[in-house]
Amino acid sequence: MLTLLTYPSAFGLFSASPFCVKTALMLQHSGQVWQRSDMLDPRRMPHQKLPVLRTPERLIPDSDLIRDWLEQKGAEFDQGLSDVEKAQSRALVRMAEEHLYFHIVLDRWGNDEVWPILRETFFTGIPTLIRKPASNAIRKSVLKGIRSQGIGRFSLPERLDRVERDLEAISAHLWQSRFLLADQPTSADMSVGPMLAAMRATPADTPLTRRIKQDNLLNSYVDRMEQAIPIA
């Protein structure tokens, strides 16, 4: 049986990581028989991150590489899409995973209201006496990485403007069909849906959580994705 090595459930989601949720959606959609195995420390994994798929032959890191493997086994995530629609799908996936994702990370790790919740959710494996200083050091490293990536250099109004343009692009697709490119979920939905769900689920009242919750189109889309491919 296939085993998905994933971060645990958190904030009402299959996993706090939208990449782990994406992979679970792909596994479920593919029809493969699989199980989850939760872990908090991925340092011994091939890329030192999750998700990782354990197959009978090897460990497969990274959600995109896992997708490649599933497609080699016969999975079709973009069935019925034209070549142009598949190109649009790839652009939507990259927008979600290489831009929206980092706003979610900053909304969680850079928010003093959210941080204590994250510390007690993600770092339970660290002894209580040293949990605060050890996790604070990790937080500092994450925020340094976000600044190096670029998102951390913008003011909040600048960040919200950048996110808004992405959400408008997503909404433009959703006005046309139940899902981004079709009337059933495709690979784009399996990336974008978990990102919006993660944005909505951040355990504090932030401009990003409010933006999703107060948008009927996006909010209902997140719910629709959860109903279309149940993974809980």
Image: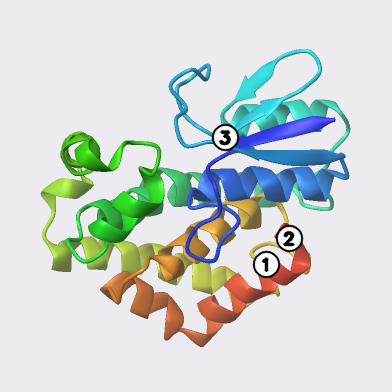
Left or right: residue 173 compared with residue 1: left
- Quarter of the image with the C terminus is bottom right
Q: Residues within 10 Å of mark 1 (few under 14, many from 20)?
A: many
| Mark 2 to mark 3 CA distance (whole Å) | 21 Å
Q: Residues within 10 Å of mark 2 (few under 14, many from 20)?
A: many
Q: Are marks 2 and 1 in contact (CB under 8 Å)?
A: yes
- Residue under the image location 60 percent in, 56 percent down: 14
Q: Which residue is mark 1?
A: 225
Q: Dot 2: what SS?
A: loop
- Give the residue type at disc 3: Pro
Q: Residues within 10 Å of mark 3 (few under 14, many from 20)?
A: many
- Residue under the image location 54 percent in, 82 percent down: 217
Label whose residue precedes the other's in the sequence (2 or 3)? 3
Left or right: residue 59 compared with residue 193: right
| Mark 1 to mark 3 CA distance (whole Å) | 20 Å
Q: Dot 1: what SS?
A: helix
Q: Which mark is residue 51?
A: 3
Quarter of the image where one finds residue 71: top right
- Give the residue type at disc 2: Pro
Farthest residue toward the top? 57
Q: Which mark is residue 185?
A: 2
- Quarter of the image with the N terminus is top right
